[in-house]
Amino acid sequence: MDYRYASASDAPAMAELFAANHHDALTEQQRAEQGFVQGAFDVDVLRAMAERGGLLVADDDGRLAGLLGLLSPADALNPPPPVAALLDAQDSLHWQGQPLSATRWLIYGPVVVDGAYRGRGVARGLFTAAVEAASGRAEVMVAFIELVNKTSWRVHVDGFGMTPMGEFTIGDRAYGVVGAPAGPSAVPGA
C-alpha cells in the first residue's frame, strides 16, 4: 500500500469513495457498523483540496483504498458549519494546557476507507501518514467526530489514542473534538 499526497487526477475516485460512504447513502445499520462521512465533497472540492496538498490517499496499485484530509485552518475556505464551529471554538479547546488558538494545528479529516479494505490496516496507515505529514507543520492534528458516529470514535480515540478535547453542538447534532500530536513518535503501536 502506498500512502501519498493526493493528486488532482485522484479526484473522481475520491469523490466516488466519499459518496459511497456518505451518511445519506447508508442505512442506519450501515452507519452504526462502519461509520460514515458527511459534507459536500464533490470532484471539484476534492480536486481543489488535492491541489493545495490537503489530502492523503492509500493507493493499492492504482486502486484508491482510502483518503484522509489534513488541512491548515487558514486553508479552510468557506468552511462548512462543523468546521466553522471548530474554528470558533479554538479559544475554549485546549491542547496540552494551551488554548488551541495558541497552538499550531491542522484539521484532520474526513477519513474514509473503501469497504473492501476495512480491517486491513488502511485507516492506521492513513493516520500514520498524517502524523508524519503534520510533523514540523503543526503540534497537533484536530478532528471533530459527530458523537453518533461511534465507529469513528472507537477507531480514532480507542484505536489511535486521539485525546478528547471538548465538544460543540450545531442544532441537534453534537460533535466531539479530539487531537493527536504530530510527529512520528506520536503513532501508537508504531
Image: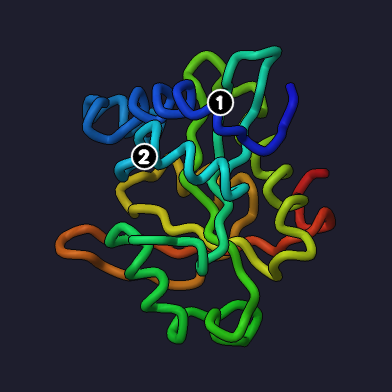
Q: Position of residue 121 (x, y in %)?
A: 67, 28
Q: CA distance from mark 2 to mark 1?
A: 15 Å
Residue 9 numbered tag: 1
Which of disc 1 and disc 2 is earlier in sequence?
A: 1
Q: Quadrant of the N terminus?
A: top right
Residue 154, relative to residue 73: is it above or below?
Answer: above
Taking depth in this image into account, of 23 and 18 the one nearest to the observer is 18
Three-letter amino acid code at disc 2?
Phe
Mark 1 Cα-neighbour bin, 10 Å: few <14, some 14–19, many ≥20: few
Q: Residue at x 65, y 67 (%)?
A: 140
* Residue that badge 2 annotates: 41
Q: Position of residue 99 (x, y in %)?
A: 55, 85
Q: Quadrant of the C terminus?
A: top right
Mark 2 Cα-neighbour bin, 10 Å: few <14, some 14–19, many ≥20: some
Q: Position of residue 183 (x, y in %)?
A: 79, 59
Q: Give the secondary structure at mark 1.
A: helix
Residue 93, relative to residue 23: is it above or below?
Answer: below
